[in-house]
Image: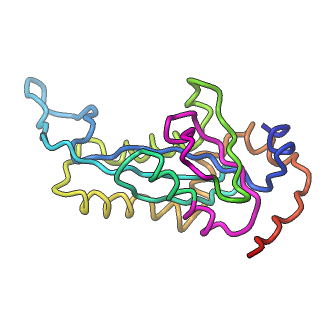
Amino acid sequence: MAATAARLEVGRVFAMDEARFGLKVSHRRLWCPFGHRPPWTHEHEYRWLWLYAAVEPTSGACFVLFLPHVDGRCFQRFLEELRRDLGPDRLGLVLDNSGSHTSGKVIWPEGVTKIPLPPYSPELNPAERWFEALRRVFANRIFESLDQLQEALAAALEPYWTVPATLQRLVGYPWWCQAIATLPPVPPHPERKT
């Protein structure tokens, strides 16, 4: 990773992925009295939203956006908002090779460079670890509406925003942090000419 980031001359490297959260949640083990069935609640509506997230494992800095789909248009919007939020720094974005990420219709913002993961290797993406933690929080819960789900997700994400060290401890893979620490200084991103 260090060699790729150095070759691309990026100063910061974020891991990015999307996760689907819906009204129908996953079930996990529950404790119940012996001889009784667990009190599962069911929601038969199949509605969901997508959490697009980019996280910097070395610092715990993150950027998230709730969007309705996983497609090139939503990914384009995420990239534009990420660029706007993080300023002019040269960024590397580590992500998988899903269709929305490789769409020829996506125009990458200036100063944001794609760093693809090897195929079939989600375990290398630190953002996946964050999604696992969030899914544990929402297991066995039912939501009445997408607005209620989005509010609950925002509340679950807030501790990570307010204390980035919490997120850094969760997603800061040692090999990732060591690779980024060895990067040479990167010249500042040239200002856009209008």
Q: Quadrant of residue 66?
A: bottom left
- The reply, left or right, for residue 149 in relation to residue 96 is left
Identify which residue, 101 or 85, lies in the foreground: 101
Outermost residue, left direction? 36
Seen at 57% across and 35% down, the residue is 96
Seen at 55% across and 31% down, the residue is 122
Identify which residue, 162 or 56, lies in the foreground: 56
Q: Is-magenta flag for residue 56? A: no
Identify which residue, 117 or 58, lies in the foreground: 117
Seen at 52% across and 40% down, the residue is 129
- The reply, left or right, for residue 17 in relation to residue 12 is left
Outermost residue, bottom direction? 194
Residue 95: x percent and y percent? 60, 40
Q: Is-magenta flag for residue 93? A: yes
Seen at 86% across and 42% down, the residue is 7
Residue 120: x percent and y percent? 56, 23
**Magenta-colored span:** 80-107
Q: Quadrant of residue 84?
A: bottom right
Q: Quadrant of the N terminus?
A: top right
Residue 76: x percent and y percent? 52, 54
Q: Quadrant of the C terminus?
A: bottom right
- The reply, left or right, for residue 152 in relation to residue 120 is left
- The reply, left or right, for residue 49 in relation to residue 193 is left
